[in-house]
Image (spheres, rainbow, N blue to C red):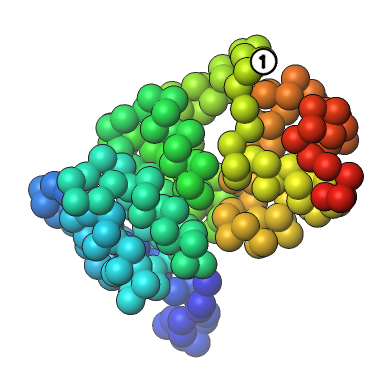
Amino acid sequence: MAEVQGDGGAQRPAPIRLLIVDDHPVVRDGLRGMFDGNDEFDVVGEAPDGVTAVARAMALRPDVVLMDLRMPGGGGVSAISQMAERKLAARILVLTTYDTDSDVLAAIEAGATGYLLKDAPPDELLRGVRAAARGDSVLSPSVASRLVGRMRAPAAASEPLSQRELEVLGLVARGVGNREAAARLFISEATVKTHLMHIYAKLGVNDRAAAVAAAFDRGLLTPGER
């Protein structure tokens, strides 16, 4: 993040540039008011749906996109995927009322850095945006509990790996580390780690080497993919 000249010549971090995406004007206004009252943040724009969010993110180049999920005229998951495909550097922090497994996993699969619920206290939201700007994974307690429970639960033998999980596993098989895999797939390192947890659970293994071996045994990878 860039720095700006402060009083007395001291350097201080530039404000976190924030794009707020929500289909409810009252919600956008409330969030803008909260962030505008803190000089650590600069709300550079708003969007009422996913389609507009992608266009404004391309034009404004925010550091963090605060993204609702279910919106008419273009949902959040689709917008997250499109931003990843366009190689936008912005971190995407989901802020929604929904914490179902399908919503959480779809958002993380698409490339979201974090997932918070709209009932989060203001301080938690501010911390979450700061963490997202650093590239850290951010999860509300209830969402974290869901993911941990899902990882601990025995995976159905018929549950297939997603296309993204196969891509991650293919890179792991070639000896690519998490950071490089994240760069190649245009997702955060935290998202790569989440994909690996899903892979381990689905394959019934505990580490990278065992995951690669199981994938070859099951024909998910071929020797030529090493």
Q: Tell me the residue at 50%/87% (across/down).
A: 9
- Residue 104, position in %: x, y? 44, 33
82 on left or right of 189 = left
Q: Tell which residue pokes out farthest to the bottom in this image.
A: 9
- Residue appearing at x 60%, y 22% in the figure: 159
- Residue 183 vs 226, above or below: the answer is below
Which amino acid does the dot numbered 1 rest on?
Ala
Residue pushed farthest left? 26
- Residue at 19%, 51% in the rendered image: 73
Residue 169, visible in the rendered structure: yes
Q: Is residue 89 left or right of residue 162?
A: left
Mark 1 surroundings within 10 Å by alpha-carbon count, few (fewer than 14), some (14 through 19), many (20 or more) = few
Q: 129 or 39: nearer the eye?
A: 129
Asked if residue 7 is positioned above or below residue 95 in the image, the reply reads below
Residue labelled with disc 1? 157
Residue located 45% across and 37% down the image: 106
Residue 156, percent from left and from top:
62, 14
Q: Secondary structure at mark 1?
A: loop
Q: Quadrant of residue 164?
A: top right
Residue 219 position in % (x across, y down): 79, 32
Name the quadrant containing residue 222: top right
Residue 140 appears in the figure: no
- The spot of residue 81 in percent (x, y) is 44, 53
| Count of residue discs | 1
In the picture shown, does residue 8 fall above or below 136? Answer: below
